[in-house]
Image (cartoon, grey):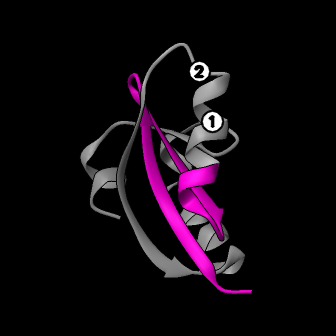
Protein backbone atom coordinates (compact mmCIF):
# COMPACT_ATOMS: atom_id res chain seq x y z
CA UNK A 1 0.00 0.00 0.00
CA UNK A 2 1.32 3.41 -0.87
CA UNK A 3 1.26 6.12 1.72
CA UNK A 4 3.83 8.60 2.96
CA UNK A 5 7.16 8.50 4.70
CA UNK A 6 7.16 11.41 7.13
CA UNK A 7 9.79 13.25 9.15
CA UNK A 8 8.49 14.62 12.43
CA UNK A 9 10.45 16.43 15.12
CA UNK A 10 9.90 16.13 18.85
CA UNK A 11 12.44 17.99 20.95
CA UNK A 12 15.88 17.11 19.60
CA UNK A 13 14.75 13.89 17.90
CA UNK A 14 13.37 13.21 14.45
CA UNK A 15 11.02 10.33 13.75
CA UNK A 16 11.06 8.75 10.33
CA UNK A 17 7.83 6.85 9.95
CA UNK A 18 5.30 5.54 7.47
CA UNK A 19 1.58 6.28 7.46
CA UNK A 20 -1.32 6.37 5.05
CA UNK A 21 -2.84 9.24 7.06
CA UNK A 22 -0.01 11.44 8.34
CA UNK A 23 -2.23 13.96 10.15
CA UNK A 24 -3.87 11.19 12.19
CA UNK A 25 -0.48 9.62 12.93
CA UNK A 26 0.97 12.91 14.17
CA UNK A 27 -2.02 13.45 16.47
CA UNK A 28 -1.44 9.98 17.92
CA UNK A 29 2.26 10.66 18.42
CA UNK A 30 1.48 13.96 20.13
CA UNK A 31 -0.71 12.25 22.71
CA UNK A 32 2.26 10.51 24.34
CA UNK A 33 4.93 13.12 23.73
CA UNK A 34 6.16 15.67 26.28
CA UNK A 35 7.18 17.89 23.32
CA UNK A 36 5.20 19.36 20.46
CA UNK A 37 5.36 17.27 17.28
CA UNK A 38 6.33 19.25 14.18
CA UNK A 39 6.03 17.83 10.68
CA UNK A 40 9.29 18.57 8.87
CA UNK A 41 8.33 16.94 5.59
CA UNK A 42 6.95 13.89 3.87
CA UNK A 43 7.28 12.03 0.61
CA UNK A 44 5.20 9.43 -1.19
CA UNK A 45 6.45 5.96 -0.38
CA UNK A 46 5.93 2.57 1.17
CA UNK A 47 7.09 0.70 4.24
CA UNK A 48 10.02 -0.44 2.10
CA UNK A 49 10.97 3.22 1.53
CA UNK A 50 10.87 3.79 5.27
CA UNK A 51 13.05 0.74 5.98
CA UNK A 52 15.57 1.88 3.37
CA UNK A 53 15.87 5.30 5.02
CA UNK A 54 16.25 3.70 8.44
CA UNK A 55 19.08 1.55 7.08
CA UNK A 56 20.81 4.49 5.38
CA UNK A 57 20.67 6.56 8.58
CA UNK A 58 21.38 3.81 11.13
CA UNK A 59 24.48 5.64 12.41
CA UNK A 60 22.15 8.38 13.69
CA UNK A 61 19.48 6.13 15.23
CA UNK A 62 18.61 6.86 18.85
CA UNK A 63 15.81 4.36 19.41
CA UNK A 64 13.70 2.39 16.94
CA UNK A 65 12.32 4.99 14.49
CA UNK A 66 13.82 8.01 16.25
CA UNK A 67 17.00 9.64 14.96
CA UNK A 68 19.31 12.43 16.06
CA UNK A 69 18.50 15.88 14.73
CA UNK A 70 21.49 16.30 12.42
CA UNK A 71 22.14 17.49 8.85
CA UNK A 72 22.26 13.93 7.48
CA UNK A 73 18.78 13.13 8.78
CA UNK A 74 17.32 16.50 7.79
CA UNK A 75 18.50 16.16 4.20
CA UNK A 76 17.55 12.48 3.72
Q: Nearer the viewer, residue 58 or 16?
A: 16
Q: Is residue 29 left or right of residue 76?
A: right
Q: Is residue 12 left or right of residue 34?
A: left
Q: How many labels sit on residues?
A: 2
- Direction top: furthest residue: 34
68 is higher (above) or lower (below) than 35: below
Q: Secondary structure at mark 1?
A: helix
Q: Residue at x 46, y 18 (%)?
A: 35
Q: Nearer the viewer, residue 4 or 13?
A: 4
Q: Are marks 2 and 1 in contact (CB under 8 Å)?
A: yes
Q: Tell me where the magenta segment starts and ends, as one range.
A: 1-24
The quadrant of the image that shows the C terminus is bottom left
Q: Residues within 10 Å of mark 1 (few under 14, many from 20)?
A: some
Q: Residue at x 60, y 56 (%)?
A: 17
Question: Is 9 colored magenta in this rendering?
Answer: yes
Question: Is 70 colored magenta in this rendering?
Answer: no
Q: Residue at x 56, y 59 (%)?
A: 22
Q: Residues within 10 Å of mark 2 (few under 14, many from 20)?
A: few
Name the residue carrying label 1: 29
23 is higher (above) or lower (below) than 38: below
Q: Is residue 25 left or right of residue 40?
A: right
Picture coordinates of residue 32, whole percent (x, y) = 67, 22
Numbered circle sitting on residue 12: none
Picture coordinates of residue 43, whole percent (x, y) = 43, 75
Q: Secondary structure at mark 2?
A: loop
Numbered circle sitting on residue 33: 2
56 is higher (above) or lower (below) than 40: below
Picture coordinates of residue 19, whole percent (x, y) = 65, 64
Residue 61 lies in quadrant: top right
The quadrant of the image that shows the N terminus is bottom right
Amino acid sequence: MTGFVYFAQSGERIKIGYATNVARRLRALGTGSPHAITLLGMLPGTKKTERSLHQQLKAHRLHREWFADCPEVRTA
